[in-house]
Amino acid sequence: MNTMTNSWALAWQLITQADSELVHITLLSLQVSATACLVGSLIGLLLGAWLAVARFPGHGLLVWLVNTLLALPAVVVGLLVYLLLSRSGPLGELGILFTPPAMVVAQSVLVTPLIAALSRRLVLSALAEGGSQLQSLGARPLTASLLMLVHDRMGVVTVLLTAFARAIAEVGAVMIVGGNIAGVTRVMTTTIALETSKGDLALALALGFVLLAVVGVVNGAIGLMQWLSNRQQHKLQVANVPLPTAPTQPANSTPDLITAAPSPLIVIDQATVRFSQVVALSKATLTLNRADRLILVGANGSGKTTLLRLMHGLLPCDAGRCEHLPLQPEGRLPRASMLFQRPFLLSLSVKRNIWLGLWLYGVPSNERRERCQRALARVGLLEHAERPARQLSGGQQQRLGLARAWALQPDILFLDEPTASLDPSAKAEIERLIEEVAATGVTIVMSTHNLGQAKRLATRVAYLQGGQLIVQRPVQEFFEGEPLPTEAAQFLQGELGWR
């Protein structure tokens, strides 16, 4: 039997007999790397979330620096940490050089930029999908950013597992700051290097097997997380089984009608909104009155969504003004909420999505539970309060989004094509809910392509084309009154050819 064969046999024997030195080195490696990842996650996740939303002079430079540190060689990190912790260094008084804490510091420096850079990308991707909706609920930028990390928990776990794999497999930094002291600072990678140089291959091979197993488990976990994430997305795409329709209100409750005389809530005067060189809305003038049901119609790209977001305060005016006026006789500014075309629901339960919206909006804690129950009862989802929100079908998600918006008790409810891509029964259900909400005195502003829907729900209709507000009239006059401007008449004829 040759030396190599003997080494393999001895290595396997060390593993199967759980050799004490092998176990000690393995446990120390796991402890150091896990602690480093914990420290790195506390700093890196916060840094990544902050960098995703912060805007200040030098922001781009800081992002570049974090991304550059991803490729920082481990031996350079080890050298820098050694200089900091050496007797003559600024942190020499700590006396932790050549101890496991020094190794934790070095690995933390290695993994923190990795966690920060990857978590920033996760947050940016999630904010692109639902950032404006969290803003609509009252979330501050950093709060929204941190919520996105909670939302994409599988992504965060994948980032942390990737960081752990890098930490436990690196050798240069821990060799320099740990000193590779037997029984004190030897970890798997440094011991493999040392024992191989000495010709003692048995322990090196055994540790190599263990290290490969650990890295394999970590990579397997990453693959599992990705598979689960893809499976969840697939379930979201195919989940289209309707839930039983529950009563939209408890039998003993009735809408709280508001009979205050109409008064202006929002005044828009010559408002213009630009996105770079593109004019999305041009010199729009409009007054929204209390108890209005204003329906915005027009083709795709006509400026409907831009006008909605401007009125809601999610977009600023580049010219002109958009002013919210105090309610009369209350004397306070109107509360507003918005149902987006595709509601962004966090990866939480149905109930928690409404609860979180109330929390972001500043609703006192003693009111949140009652409001959640009332809102879910109104849309027929009370029995499904604990169900994962993102597993609901499209119509059910719209109902949940409407419940979340209504739970804020808004004076104005903005709806951006709330029935787009829904089947006829789901559209009818959403329309009925909108009518019920409007019956309580809530002012409605809604965009739609469905002119039949506009006739059923509106008290006033406004037509937009190419970012311009062409005409606005009471609903009866819009459809049956004097001839409309040419652009609006052509659109009407195209949508209602039977007219």
Image (cartoon, helix red, strand yellow):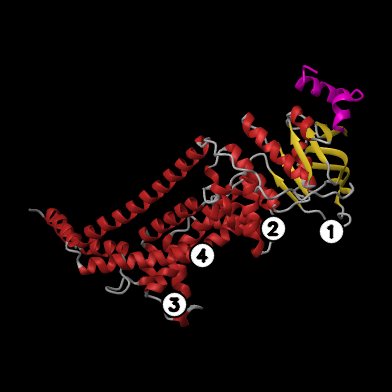
Which sits earlier in the primary sequence, circle 1 or circle 3? 3
Q: Quadrant of residue 431?
A: top right
Q: In the rendered structure, which amino acid carries the disc numbered 4?
A: Leu
Q: Where are the magenta residues, as a range?
A: 474-499
Q: Nearer the viewer, mark 3 or mark 2?
A: 2
Which sits earlier in the primary sequence, circle 2 or circle 1? 1
Distance from Cα at disc 2 to Cα at disc 1: 16 Å
Q: In the rendered structure, which amino acid carries the disc numbered 2?
A: Tyr
Which residue in the structure is indicated by mark 3? 86
Which disc number belongs to residue 332?
A: 1
**Dot 3 alpha-carbon crowd within 10 angstroms: few under 14, some 14 to 19, many 20 or more:** some
Residue 25's x, y, as percent? 28, 67
Which sits earlier in the primary sequence, circle 1 or circle 4? 4
Q: In the rendered structure, which amino acid carries the disc numbered 3?
A: Ser
The residue sitting at 67% across, 48% down in the picture is 133
Mark 4 in CB contact with mark 3 (< 8 angstroms): no
Residue 438's x, y, as percent? 77, 43
Q: Nearer the viewer, mark 1 or mark 4?
A: 1
Residue 234's x, y, as percent? 48, 38
Which sits earlier in the primary sequence, circle 4 or circle 3? 4
Question: Is residue 219 depicted above or below 467 in this figure?
Answer: below
Which residue in the structure is indicated by mark 4? 42
Question: Regarding mark 2 in the picture, which secondary structure is present there?
Answer: loop
Which residue in the structure is indicated by mark 2? 361
Question: Regarding mark 3 in the picture, which secondary structure is present there?
Answer: loop
Mark 1 in CB contact with mark 3 (< 8 angstroms): no
Q: In the rendered structure, which amino acid carries the disc numbered 1?
A: Arg
Distance from Cα at disc 3 to Cα at disc 2: 51 Å
> Which of the two residues, 256 or 231, is positioned nearer the viewer here?
256
Mark 3 in CB contact with mark 2 (< 8 angstroms): no
